[in-house]
Amino acid sequence: MEIGVVGKPNVGKSTLFNAWTLLDAPMAPYPFTTLAPNRGVAAVRSPCPHLEKGTPCTPGNAKCVAGVRWIPVNLVDVPGLVPGAHEGKGLGHQFLDDLRAADGFVQVVDLSGGTDAEGRLVPAGTQNPADEVDWLQSELVAWVAEILGRDFDRHAKSVELEGHKVEEFLAQRLTGLAIPPAAITATLRDADVDRAHPSHWSAADRARFAAELLRASKPRLVAANKCDRASRAAAEGLEEAVRPTPVVATAADAELTLRRASRAGLVSYAPGDPGFAVTDPGRLSPAQARALDGLRPVFTAWGSTGVQPALETMVFGRLGRMVVYPVEDETHWTDSRGRVLPDAFLVPRGTPARAVAYRVHTDLGEQFVRAIDGRTHRALGADHPLEPNAVVRIVARK
Ligand SMILES: Nc1nc2c(ncn2[C@@H]2O[C@H](COP(=O)(O)OP(=O)(O)OP(=O)(O)O)[C@@H](O)[C@H]2O)c(=O)[nH]1
Ligand SMILES: [Mg+2]
């Protein structure tokens, strides 16, 4: 799974990306600081089942701190998008193609209204962040419609002449866009297009189909960034304007400062916390002390920086993911080497047992016999949907 961090230039995409990943992607107060995509791994929190067992866990692919598992999530931060990007404006095409594999988008906007459409800094409050949510959606639609439309008529006619399935024809045209086949089928059913005759589709039909398909297959969340310079009323106005897309107010700069200060041992702070404490005031330079003090109003006004909650709302809410823990011994919750709850995977809610087996290893999926629930010890069939936080053993043919 990969999440694309998108938005117009200079809104704080790379700052958010750095806060989430603790990487060092370049950030600066002017547009097009990012010229090529940055890829990295962030993490979302989930209560670790080891607490129920009363034995410490031995995570392989994630860390566990004070009973909280940090489960990895892939992110891609791309160059800023400007209106007309689908026609190649700004770094348009290159930017969009780097998003092909993304399962959903966090759109970063400047809640303070202090950045124009091209990413130039302007006085705060002179821009309406709801506008960029609209035009970014149009750019994404135009991009997908363009991919769909390449040589469309010729191919569509041959599909009809040769009696191929329209779903397969569309899936083939959209290969590489990480769109689940079920979303194509559902969109074909729901969008107002001639289902049987794609050769009759006009450019407007393709755009309508692309819009509906994006809505169905690429969930979005708006990170209302630079909230340290904006009011609650601004956040509420934005929420109202972009409903039903969820909005989470974020202070990326503050979060990045605190995560770095925490890594350096200067503050006690965990992502999502409602505040922070200076570990040893004597170790701070006057400038550091001032900078940290300057972050306190964010917590007073917003309760947290919103950065960790934004990612978790995206992963668990918008993308509907849950965590599952495959083990080899359903009593001790260990693998063959005795490690307790070694793996934690993010899978779509309701994923059936066999699909989880495939996720662990193709062989395990192919040789699947049954799964065993680590809590109830009941046998589960291939199609049985797993519960969130399930601990399961997969039994396979030898
Ligand atoms: N006040 C405030 N400034 C922020 C915040 N987040 C980022 N910035 C500033 O916004 C400017 C742009 O940040 P970047 O992370 O480079 O923005 P970007 O969207 O990646 O920009 P491009 O790569 O050019 O598209 C920098 O000066 C950041 O310090 C925030 O939460 N509050
Ligand atoms: Mg950037």
Image (cartoon, grey):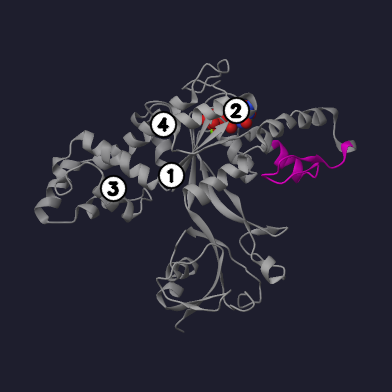
Amino acid type of the residue that numbered disc 4 sits on in the rendered structure: Leu
Picture quadrant of ligand 1: top right
> Which labelled disc corresponds to residue 232?
2
Residue 228 visible, this orientation: yes
Helix, strand or loop at label 4? It is helix
Q: Position of residue 67 (x, y in %)?
A: 70, 60
Q: Give the SS element for disc 1.
A: loop
Residue at 61 percent of width and 61 percent of height: 61
The stretch of residues the image draws in magenta is 257-281
Q: Nearer the viewer, residue 209 or 13?
A: 209
Residue at the location (56% across, 48% down)?
312
Q: Are marks 4 and 2 in contact (CB under 8 Å)?
A: no
- Mark 3, residue position: 187
Q: Is residue 371 above or below residue 318?
A: below
Question: What kind of residue is marked 3?
Answer: Thr
Task: Count all numbered tags in the image, as a single digit.
Answer: 4
Task: Read off the residue under disc 4.
Answer: 136
Image coordinates of residue 70 in percent, x first then y, are 63, 55
